[in-house]
Image (cartoon, rainbow, N blue to C red):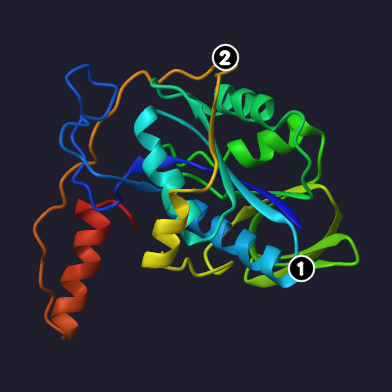
Amino acid sequence: MRVIVCIKRVVDTETRVKIGSDGKSIDLGGVQYITAPYDEMAVEKAIQLRDAAGEGNVTVVTVGPAAATKELRTALAMGADEAVHVVCEEPLGAQATTTALKAALEGREYDLVLCGKQATDDDDAAVGPMLAAALDMPCVAFAHGLAIEDGKAVVEREVDGETEILEVDLPAVVTAQKGLAEPRYPGLKGIMAAKKKPLANVDLVQGEDTVETVSLELPPARGDMVTIEPSEAGMRSLLESLRNEKKVL
């Protein structure tokens, strides 16, 4: 089972976000970085699929700055076999990222491409489906279950509270939703082994981005909490407030 996993280096989800002086970017001073959580689930699932097949390899690929080597080494420590780093210091949008990933995969043989359903910075959930279209492959997004049976991918995902089961031919692109796999913590043995695993740097193939960030702003601060007495008068007061002040009724 040969699996490609696309991962992204993102700002730690516990970071208190500050808007940069330009008004349309994040102030990255002193922030910590992690692998996007859904991408970690994709890495874990790829390792499980390879191990279940008893053969194959897992290759992790990222488009990001030189410092993103840390996230690639983490994936290798989890159990991935090799890594490919498309070095790009400037952040890219979904379209340019797709172009870079497609170029990085050219000439490689694989049965499956896994991505997280979305990165936790842009939250656009676009790269997986766009990459599938660029590679001319079937795509199933938001998967919380995945198995390989008779050369096909059997994918489960939740739709309107029900479970939809799809069967697609390989190679295919699948994006990981919560529940697909619980990422393992790399042990000391894996961390030491990761230092010897191949990590190739490849040149960026520059694509065009048609989306531009015009401005960013923080959501308005929450108002003070109002306590309502659990009584008829309290309920009446609540309804009047919702109707006359908040205008939601």
Query: Residue at coordinates 46% horizontally, 41% vertically from top-left?
Result: 8
- Residue at the right extreme of this rendering: 150
**Is 154 placed above or below 235 here?**
above
- Whether residue 98 is visible to the viewer of this picture, yes or no, is yes
Q: Nearer the viewer, residue 221 or 48?
A: 48
Amino acid residing under circle 1: Ala
Label whose residue precedes the other's in the sequence (2 or 1): 1
Judging by the rendered image, the residue that carries numbered circle 2 is: 206
**Is 145 placed above or below 57 here?**
below
Q: Position of residue 129 (x, y in %)?
A: 68, 40
Task: Point out the frontmost of discs 2 and 1.
Answer: 1
Q: Position of residue 116 (x, y in %)?
A: 55, 50
Q: Position of residue 126 (x, y in %)?
A: 59, 37
Amino acid residing under circle 2: Gln
Q: Nearer the viewer, residue 241 or 28?
A: 28
* Mark 2, secondary structure of its residue: loop
Query: Residue at coordinates 60% horizontally, 16% vertically from top-left?
Result: 205
Mark 1: few, some, or many residues within 10 Å (few <14, many ≥20)?
few
Query: Residue at coordinates 37% horizontally, 43% vertically from top-left?
Result: 70
**Is 68 placed above or below 171 here?**
above
Q: Nearer the viewer, residue 233 or 88?
A: 88
Q: Nearer the viewer, residue 51 or 44?
A: 51
**Is 28 placed above or below 140 here?**
above
Judging by the rendered image, the residue that carries numbered circle 1 is: 53
